[in-house]
Image: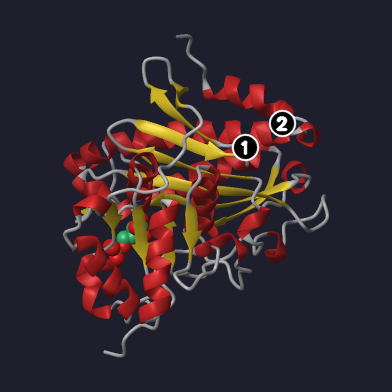
Amino acid sequence: MSVVTLNEFIIERQADFPYAKGELTRLLTHIGVAAKVVNREVNKAGLVDILGEAGSDNIQGEQQKKLDVYADEKFISSLRSSGECCGIASEENENVVAFDDELAKNGKYIVTMDPLDGSSNIDVNVSIGTIFSIYKRISSIGHKAKIEDFIQEGTKQLAAGYIIYGSSTMMVYTTGRGVNGFTLDPSIGEFCLSHPDIKTPVSGSLYSINEGNYIKFPEGVKQYLKYCQEIDGPTGRPYTSRYIGSLVADFHRNLLKGGIFIYPKSAGYPSGKLRLLYECNPMAMLVEQAGGKATDGRGNRIMDIKPKSLHQREPFFVGSRNMIDKAEKFMLKYGHKEPKL
Ligand code: P6P
């Protein structure tokens, strides 16, 4: 079977976007380049620990950057040089990064991203990831990006995706015409199409949630967990609990195998923990394109939520359609309010 590289695939699909005239193509290509650079450093992370803690000087005497700061800088510089992106909202930066060079100010797109999600897992060699969304800017071209360019509903996303730095490194993305996965072949330094047209099973038998927070969960979540753990062979229960604590890794496994991931609001996180703009919305676009569902546990579609701020958190229920519907029924019946502890 002939290998299709990410760049070949993006160009082949460019025809889907006649209006984009190759701009979206260039953006996605630059994201792919930055992903390869970050992948190289993530794979060396263990060595850095041997040679010195992050934040100290490495053997070249250079100041060793924390990997998430490093990833943030790499993606920002790659997107800036694409000439298509006028600004970035990143988990690593309190405010938007609005580019002020002429080339970038003429960019028609903005990117929201978590450059290295789950980075606390690096020093224990657990999979981590980069998550991104691409939107058309609202403010006028030729000027610096403005906050209104970034606080758009998830339904306005033109593209969304993630890179998972795991047992292999993959880039999974959608431009609204299905979901495709590409595995990095280190021998040629290219992402190659390995998972064409990903569809997530309508039902699954995996549930992913941090059960350590059980006492802080709303009653609806507690009752749904009991449902998952009951013995009922015909429905495949008890389900299997699988929780890595790295969103990209938990999401990727459930996307391929079927399952539900829940980070609900709780007494500890009254609005949930995950960020709407650069964690929930991109994953919501991907899962819907793959036939799944993403809600806030109160019957609201994640992508319909109008953001109020850059780093806004939302409760997050994402995965196989039938499992989300069942969880929402428990939330409706038993309540989604977090307990007062
Ligand atoms: P907890 C990682 O810090 C992260 O942002 C997501 O990748 C992950 O799903 C979640 O937090 C894990 O949170 O509270 O279970 O450790």
Label disc, if present, on residue 248 of the rendered structure: none
Q: Quadrant of residue 82?
A: top right
* Image quadrant in which the N terminus is located: top left
* Image quadrant in which the C terminus is located: bottom left
Residues at discs 2 and 1 in contact (Cβ within 8 Å): yes
Residue labelled with disc 1: 177
Residue 208 in the image, given as x and y percentages of width and height? 29, 57
- Is residue 295 visible to us here? yes
Question: Going by the image, does 46 lie left or right of 72?
Answer: left
- Given residues 134 and 54, the one toward you in this image is 134
Q: Quadrant location of ligand 1?
A: bottom left
Residue 130 in the image, given as x and y percentages of width and height? 44, 46
Which element type, helix, strand or loop, lies under badge 2? Answer: helix
Residue labelled with disc 2: 16
Q: Which residue is drawn at 36% across and 62% down?
A: 262
Residue situated furthest top in the rendering: 1
Q: Hey, what amino acid is under mark 2?
A: Asp
Alpha carbon distance from label 2 to label 1: 8 Å
Residue situated furthest front in the rendering: 234
Q: Which residue is drawn at 43% across and 76% down?
A: 332
Which numbered disc, 2 or 1, marks the residue that appears first in the sequence? 2
Which element type, helix, strand or loop, lies under badge 1? Answer: loop
